Amino acid sequence: MSESSKRATGERESARDHGSELQHVTVEHDDIAVCTMFPQNIDEDAISTAWLTATTDSFVALEDRR
């Protein structure tokens, strides 16, 4: 990390500062996929409010959206 991008002690850095910092878990069962994404580094108190879940019918091919 360059000197200009360092933060003061205790100040949080956003995902934009480091690129994508999401983890994901995908579970497939009976032709249904469920993908849940969540931040890698998050306080335990905030974890229940910082996730996103999508099912099979929510996914689209990247080529279809370009």
Image (cartoon, rainbow, N blue to C red):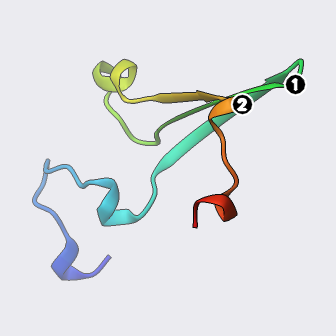
Location of residue 56 with respect to 63 vertically, above or below: above
Quarter of the image for the N terminus: give it. bottom left
**In the displayed structure image, the side of residue 10 where residue 33 appears, left or right:** right
The residues tagged by marks 2 and 1 sit, at their Cα atoms, a distance apart of: 8 Å
First of labels 2, 1 by sequence position: 1
Q: Position of residue 53 (x, y in %)?
A: 54, 27
Q: Label 1 near label 2: C-beta < 8 Å?
A: yes
Residue at mark 2? 56
Secondary element under disc 2, as helix, strand or loop, is helix
Residue at mark 1? 31
Report the front residue among 60 and 40.
Answer: 60
**In the displayed structure image, the side of residue 4 where residue 56 appears, left or right:** right
Give the residue drawn at x 13%, y 51%. Answer: 11
Kindly identify which numbered label has been placed on residue 50: none
Q: Amino acid at mark 1?
A: Asp
Give the residue drawn at x 29%, y 19%. Answer: 45
Secondary element under disc 1, as helix, strand or loop, is loop
Report the front residue among 19 and 6.
Answer: 19
Q: Position of residue 8 (x, y in %)?
A: 10, 60
**In the displayed structure image, the side of residue 5 where residue 64 appears, left or right:** right
Q: Mark 1, residues whose alpha carbon is within 10 Å: few (<14), some, or many (≥20)? A: few
Quarter where residue 58 is shown: top right
Give the residue drawn at x 44%, y 29%. Answer: 51
